[in-house]
Amino acid sequence: MVGAEASRPLTVVSSMATRQMLADLVDVYRRETGEQAEVQSMGGVDAAQRVLEGQPYDVVVLAADAIVRLAVAGRIDPRSRVDLVRSGIAVAVRAGATVPALGNGAAVRRAVMSARSVGYSTGPSGAYVLKLFEGWGIGAGASTPRVVQAPPGVPVGSLVASGEVDIGFQQLSELMHMDGITVAGLLPPDIQSTTVFSAAICCTAQRQDSARALIAFLASPAANDAKLRQGMEPA
């Protein structure tokens, strides 16, 4: 039984924001250590719900506030939490469209107000952007643009590429590899919001030492290049 358990791949559940970063890093980790790890990425709300339900994952990687909620619920070991990356919000338009100026918050507001429709996500970037829009009075009247939330696990960039929305807001890591869009840039510093993504060991983990070793690798300097390639900064 112990041998069979040791040969089982480690299971990692994450939000879509860290999907490509984790895919790259677990591949490197496998080559360097021989340890197999499988990553399941989905909308962050769904990922957190699966951990809350006690589904058998070894490691969870989510926004830091979601990790805190899982700790309060007794679903992860709070002592195992390690911050991995910081991620900023970017803006995208359809490929070929005029790229808006994003020099400051006022410029971003003008770009939003001139759009027919605006997209945002179900993740932490979406919650922040929606609050930003509310502060600008968007969504309160017929003269404001239509605000569209992408379904869980669906990239906002796909709504932009299809023309469903004129402009979209999401983590840079989720926009930068999408076809059919142009990333106009990050939100300017005066309205930027940075999300920290953290890893932790799930209480359902059967191989806690192996899970801890994987998290240590994900947080190590050896992982920095992969993080930067995906538009994130090491935490």
Image (cartoon, grey):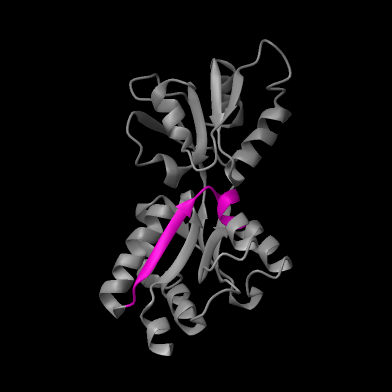
Report the residue that reaches farthest toward the top: 143
Residue 33: percent from the left, percent from the top?
Answer: 30, 79
Residue at 49%, 79% in the rendered image: 212
Residue at 29%, 78% in the rendered image: 34
Q: Is residue 18 left or right of residue 123?
A: left
Residue 7 falls in image quadrant: bottom left
Residue at 66%, 29% in the rendered image: 133
Residue at 66%, 57% in the rendered image: 65
Count of marks placed on residues:
0
Q: Is residue 94 left or right of residue 202?
A: left
Report the residue that reaches farthest toward the front: 1
> Taking the image as drawn, is residue 111 in sight?
no
Q: Is residue 174 left or right of residue 195?
A: left
In the picture shown, does residue 33 fall above or below 100?
Answer: below
Is residue 41 within the magenta segment? yes
Q: Observer-nearest residue: 89 or 206?
A: 206
> Taking the image as drawn, is residue 87 in sight?
yes
Bounds of the magenta segment: 35-48
In the picture shown, does residue 36 fall above or below 48?
Answer: below
Q: Quadrant of the N terminus?
A: bottom left
Residue 136: percent from the left, percent from the top?
Answer: 70, 25
Report the residue that reaches farthest toward the bottom: 2
Residue 187: percent from the left, percent from the top?
Answer: 53, 37
In the picture shown, does residue 97 fall above or below 207?
Answer: above
Q: Observer-nearest residue: 181 or 72?
A: 72
